[in-house]
Image (tube, rainbow, N blue to C red):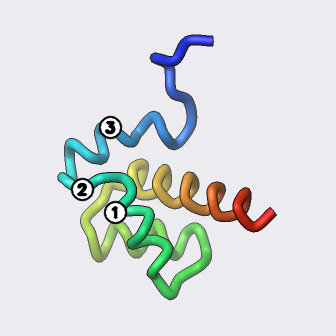
Amino acid sequence: MSSSTVKGPASYFPSIEKKYGRPIAEWKDLIRSSPLTKHMELVTWLKTEHGLGHGHANALVAHTLAEDTAREG
């Protein structure tokens, strides 16, 4: 398996960090500290409050929620 090919939401992370100037961990903290819990609510919030594009917001939310679900499991 090639380590250079990142699949799924994480494949967006380098461009998110480059474009918005914040580390991924910071975005995840923001998502986790938000009172919102639904996927699309969080995506819309990132887009309106933080100016992220839809694809980037969607990738961050999907990855963060998946991590949290795995942690709870």
- The residue identified by callout 1 is 26
Q: Is residue 7 left or right of residue 31?
A: right
- The residue identified by callout 2 is 22
Q: Residues within 10 Å of mark 3 (few under 14, many from 20)?
A: few
Measured as percent of width and height from the top left, residue 32 is found at: 50, 74
Q: Residue at x 55, y 29 (%)?
A: 7
Q: Residue at x 40, y 39 (%)?
A: 12
Q: CA distance from mark 3 to mark 2?
A: 10 Å
Measured as percent of width and height from the top left, residue 61 is found at: 51, 60
The residue under label 2 is which amino acid type? Arg
Q: Is residue 49 above or below residue 21?
A: below
Q: CA distance from mark 1 to mark 3?
A: 14 Å
Q: Are marks 1 and 3 in contact (CB under 8 Å)?
A: no
- The residue identified by callout 3 is 14
Specify the farthest residue to the top. Answer: 1
Q: Are marks 2 and 1 in contact (CB under 8 Å)?
A: yes
Q: Are marks 3 and 2 in contact (CB under 8 Å)?
A: no
Q: What secondary structure is marked by label 1?
A: helix
The residue under label 3 is which amino acid type? Pro
Q: Is residue 37 above or below residue 64?
A: below
Q: Residues within 10 Å of mark 1 (few under 14, many from 20)?
A: few
Give the mark nearer the N terminus: 1 vs 3: 3
Measured as percent of width and height from the top left, residue 58 is found at: 49, 55
Q: What secondary structure is marked by label 2?
A: loop
Q: Is residue 22 left or right of residue 13?
A: left
User: In the picture, which quadrant includes the N terminus?
Assistant: top right
Q: Is residue 2 left or right of residue 19?
A: right
Of tags 1 and 3, the one toward the viewer is 1
The residue under label 1 is which amino acid type? Glu
